[in-house]
Image (cartoon, rainbow, N blue to C red):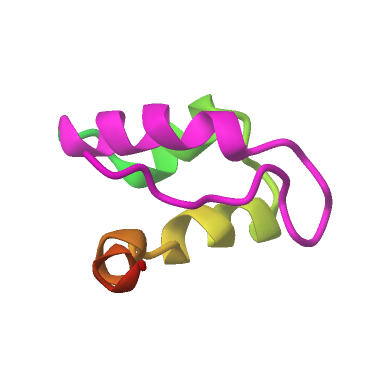
Amino acid sequence: MINIIIPVRCITCGKPVGGLWETYKQRIGNGEQTAKVLDDLGLERYCCRALFLTHQDVLSNVAKFRT
């Protein structure tokens, strides 16, 4: 499985968020509500929440073109 690229820190406020992505992805995959998961992970600022809600897994597409 190819890992995705998520920023280590929030681009706007600098809060460390890189270690939360796998937990977020797993819990969303289990059918939990997005807002509850973000609250439980301590992502209360709009910038951090937007980072998680808008992140796209593009590494698998880009990896096809590596040399």
Residue 60 image offset from top left, x and y in percent: 26, 60
Seen from the viewer's position, the closer of residues 64 and 59 is 64
Instruction: Magenta stretch: give its range.
Output: 1-30
Residue 31 image offset from top left, x and y in percent: 16, 36
**Magenta run includes residue 41:** no
Q: Judge left or right: residue 64 versus residue 55.
A: left
Q: Judge left or right: residue 15 versus residue 63.
A: right
The residue that appears at 56% across and 62% down in the rendered structure is: 50
Q: Quadrant of residue 11?
A: bottom right
Q: Is residue 24 above or below residue 50?
A: above
Q: Judge left or right: residue 3 versus residue 11.
A: left
Q: Judge left or right: residue 54 versus residue 44.
A: left
**Magenta run includes residue 28:** yes
Residue 63 image offset from top left, x and y in percent: 31, 63
Which quarter of the image is occupied by the C terminus?
Answer: bottom left
Count every numbered label the image shows and give the total. 0
Residue 34 image offset from top left, x and y in percent: 35, 45
| Magenta stretch secondary structure, dominant | loop
Seen from the viewer's position, the closer of residues 6 and 10 is 6
Q: Quadrant of residue 23?
A: top left
The residue that appears at 36% across and 42% down in the rendered structure is: 3
